[in-house]
């Protein structure tokens, strides 16, 4: 324990030396410090376990060591699970007690309220099975119990959800991660009054599973530019051509939009009477409605770009040849 306290102190000194503005410690998502705070996982019978005060001793020693090292030059915050929704864990009232304890130390400048675990329900990276900002009211309960600022993060998938959380007084600051991966211009579009143009995060967690399950590079199911920002803006066409895209599912819609954004003249044929392909089947399942939001966003994007969309058009070889496009792309998918 003494070695860990020293490690945290040393790390804080390095952060200060690097010139960062602050430090946030993880007391959440089954990290070491949450395990000490939790009556579920802290089974010690010495000075670091048992009563609430003893379970909090290790985290308090770390915070005191960090504050002694950096003084008041750095902001120090705590990312806290607002509750542990499993038998034996602390409940929402327990989360409030922990937050109050942190404030009383005088070593904590803000509380970052979150939920979840890598193993249970809800996940620490909540998917579309849950409502946007579903646990913000728990952050609000902490905000009403302490005087230091409270941050809320958890399935905030756009500026409207963030504004709602703030207006209800559930937090002073709202955090977004996956929504920013889906559209890196989210804040600029919201500020300029173009929230409808924000590419919607569907909460499918492709960004997570690609890297950690499939072993693929980081990416986003709805945005092919994500993780490629270093390549710069999407390029303009050197030679403008006409493109016929056959298939109006997710791939065909994205290809048509990207080509149009490059400056090409694009026509999109879809055999059915609506765009979206098999996603139109998926959105009929409970909690998959945000996938429909994505299709609606793509349709508005295609219209704005001037893509000619022909619905109910089944492509035959003769039809494709008669169209006399410079290039033809088949996006008939499954």
Image: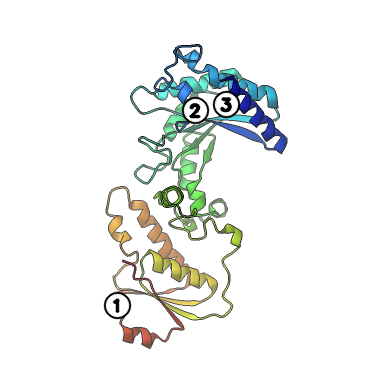
User: On residue 148, which mark appears?
Assistant: 3
What is the secondary structure assignment of the residue under circle 1?
loop
Asked if residue 240 shows in the view, the reply is: yes
Q: Nearer the viewer, mark 3 or mark 1?
A: 1
Residue at left offset 40%, top offset 27%: 84
Asked if residue 303 shows in the view, the reply is: no
Label 3 and label 2: CA atoms lie apart by 24 Å
Residue at left offset 43%, top offset 33%: 115
Q: Nearer the viewer, residue 113 or 87?
A: 87
Label 3 and label 1: CA atoms lie apart by 61 Å
Give the residue pinned by disc 1.
314
Q: Nearer the viewer, mark 2 or mark 1?
A: 2
Q: Quadrant of the N terminus?
A: top right
- Image position of 71 with respect to 120: above or below: above
Q: Nearer the viewer, residue 211 or 249?
A: 211
User: Around disc 3, counting alpha carbons within 10 Å, would you say few (fewer than 14), some (14 to 19), or many (20 or more)?
Assistant: some
Q: Earlier in the sequence, mark 3 or mark 2?
A: 2
Q: Nearer the viewer, residue 220 or 95?
A: 220
């Amino acid at each position: 324990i003494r070695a860990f306290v020293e490690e945290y102190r040393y790390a804080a000194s390095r952060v200060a030396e690097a010139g960062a503005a602050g430090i946030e410690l993880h007391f959440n998502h089954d990290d070491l410090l949450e395990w000490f705070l939790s009556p579920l996982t802290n089974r010690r019978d010495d000075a670091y376990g048992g009563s609430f005060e003893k379970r909090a001793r290790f985290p308090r020693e770390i915070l005191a060591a960090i504050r002694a090292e950096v003084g008041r030059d750095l902001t120090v915050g705590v990312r806290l699970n607002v509750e542990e929704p499993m038998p034996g864990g602390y409940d929402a009232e327990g989360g409030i007690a922990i937050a109050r304890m942190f404030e009383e130390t005088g070593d904590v400048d803000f509380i970052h309220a979150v939920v979840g675990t890598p193993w249970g329900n809800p996940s620490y990276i909540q998917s579309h099975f849950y409502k946007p900002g579903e646990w913000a009211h728990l952050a609000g309960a902490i905000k009403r119990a302490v005087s230091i600022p409270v941050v809320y993060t958890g399935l905030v998938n756009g500026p409207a959800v963030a504004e709602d959380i703030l207006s209800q007084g559930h937090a002073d600051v709202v955090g977004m991660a996956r929504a920013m991966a889906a559209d890196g211009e989210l804040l600029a579009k919201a500020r300029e009054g173009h929230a409808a143009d924000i590419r919607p995060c569907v909460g499918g967690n492709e960004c997570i599973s690609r890297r950690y399950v499939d072993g693929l590079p980081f990416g986003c199911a709805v945005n092919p530019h994500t993780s490629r920002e270093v390549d710069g803006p999407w390029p303009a066409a050197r030679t403008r051509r006409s493109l016929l895209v056959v298939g109006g599912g997710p791939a065909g819609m994205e290809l048509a939009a990207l080509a149009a954004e490059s400056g090409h003249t694009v026509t999109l044929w879809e055999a059915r009477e609506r765009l979206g392909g098999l996603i139109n089947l998926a959105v009929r399942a409970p909690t998959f409605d945000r996938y429909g939001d994505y299709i609606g966003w793509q349709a508005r994007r295609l219209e704005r770009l001037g893509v000619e969309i022909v619905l109910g058009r089944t492509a035959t070889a003769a039809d494709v040849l008669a169209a006399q496009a410079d290039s033809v792309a088949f996006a008939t998918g499954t």
